[in-house]
Image (tube, helix red, strand yellow):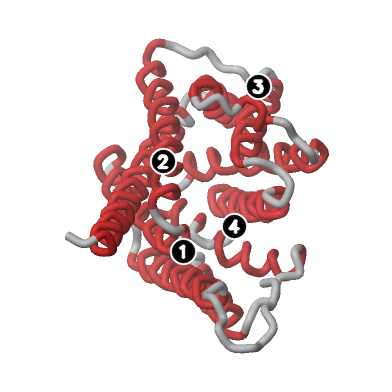
């Protein structure tokens, strides 16, 4: 085998492994959501959000210490880290409410609208141009959201739907901040201060409605911590081996896990309206991801590059 063929084969293997890691990471995060949904039947949203941070913090700190990247925790924009922390506390609490009130697949269908909101917010906040193709995909995607929210499916006014929409918007705002912070902050600092904010903020809020934690909760808390930590590791490895533009589409495999796990644990199945609406939203999200790849492709002509 020639050197060129060997490098091509190695690159192909890395991409294949990256896709596998991504799918497994999404599965782990689905298990994490199963844990939060189950815990939400007995514990408050504040408590579960606190445990989400507290069970992940030791793993994140351990990874940073083992990799000897402690110096990379230095933050340049403390103010924006705090703002992201406050937004993240809000969207995680509403995420738990959504998981408690809605079937797992319905909750995921709402969360999948986040890339559509992120595309619009990127144009408004970050002044990133949104071409007619991506803008058209956003409109189609929101039509998919309306299909899911018709009265025969989820409806517009339930606590779960309102919490899900707030969670989706909060997550989108948080991701816009991450895009901005990536200009000055390291990935390690973004991950660490996110988890630290959840742990401290939700820990303080949990005193408002603390409920006894029993041994019956222990397996779910254990799964919450382990699945979150393994999922984060697999996600990191996936992005190390394959480009984000390729991996982003595989995030939507979450719907497969949501339908399967929802049926196994709670005998839940989404309605045809949710399936059709989520298919429209997912298709729009994949198309937006494709256009992101196209617009970032190297331009070989003499046309001036645009900062998209």
Q: Calculate the distance from the C-alpha at mark 4 to the C-alpha at mark 3.
A: 29 Å
Please tell me which of labels 1 and 2 falls first in the chain.
Answer: 2
Tell me, for residue 203, which label it has, or none: 3
Placement of 67 over or under 105, stated as above or below: above
**In this rendering, which labeled residue sits more in front, label 4 or label 2?**
2
**In this rendering, which labeled residue sits more in front, label 2 or label 3?**
2
Residue, disc 2: 29
Q: Calculate the distance from the C-alpha at mark 4 to the C-alpha at mark 2.
A: 27 Å
**In this rendering, which labeled residue sits more in front, label 3 or label 1?**
1
- Taking depth in this image into account, of 107 and 295 the one nearest to the observer is 295
Q: Residues within 10 Å of mark 2 (few under 14, many from 20)?
A: many
Tell me, for residue 245, which label it has, or none: 1
Q: Farthest residue toward the right?
A: 79
Q: Calculate the distance from the C-alpha at mark 2 to the C-alpha at mark 3.
A: 22 Å
Horizontal side, residue 251 vs residue 46: left or right: left
The residue at the point 67 percent across, 79 percent down is 305
Where disc 1 sits, the SS reads helix
The residue at the point 55 percent across, 54 percent down is 161
Please tell me which of labels 4 and 3 falls first in the chain.
Answer: 4
Label 4–label 2 contact, CB within 8 A: no
Q: Is residue 269 visible?
A: no
């Amino acid at each position: 085998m020639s050197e060129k063929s060997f490098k091509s084969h190695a690159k192909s293997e890395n991409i294949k492994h990256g896709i596998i890691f991504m799918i497994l990471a999404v599965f782990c995060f689905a298990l994490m959501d199963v844990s939060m949904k189950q815990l939400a039947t007995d514990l408050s949203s504040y408590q579960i959000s606190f445990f989400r941070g507290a069970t992940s913090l030791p793993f994140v700190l351990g990874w940073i210490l083992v990799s000897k990247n402690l110096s990379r925790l230095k933050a340049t924009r403390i103010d924006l880290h705090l703002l992201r922390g406050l937004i993240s506390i809000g969207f995680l609490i509403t995420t738990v409410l959504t998981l408690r009130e809605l079937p797992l697949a319905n909750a995921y269908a709402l969360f999948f609208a986040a890339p559509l909101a992120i595309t619009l917010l990127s144009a408004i906040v970050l002044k990133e141009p949104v071409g007619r193709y991506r803008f058209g995909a956003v409109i189609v995607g929101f039509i998919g959201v309306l299909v899911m929210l018709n009265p025969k499916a989820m409806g517009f006014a339930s606590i779960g739907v309102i919490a899900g929409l707030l969670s989706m918007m909060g997550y989108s705002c948080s991701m816009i901040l991450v895009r901005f912070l990536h200009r000055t902050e390291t990935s390690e600092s973004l991950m660490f201060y996110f988890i630290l904010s959840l742990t401290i903020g939700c820990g303080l809020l949990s005193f408002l409605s603390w409920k006894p934690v029993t041994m019956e909760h222990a397996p779910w808390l254990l799964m919450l911590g382990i699945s979150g930590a393994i999922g984060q590791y697999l996600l990191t490895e996936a992005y190390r081996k394959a480009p984000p533009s390729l991996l982003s589409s595989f995030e939507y495999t979450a719907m497969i896990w949501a339908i399967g796990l929802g049926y196994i644990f709670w005998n839940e199945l989404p309605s045809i309206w949710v399936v059709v609406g989520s298919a429209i939203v997912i298709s729009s999200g994949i198309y937006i991801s494709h256009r992101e790849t196209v617009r970032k492709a190297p331009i070989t002509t003499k046309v001036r590059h645009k900062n998209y």
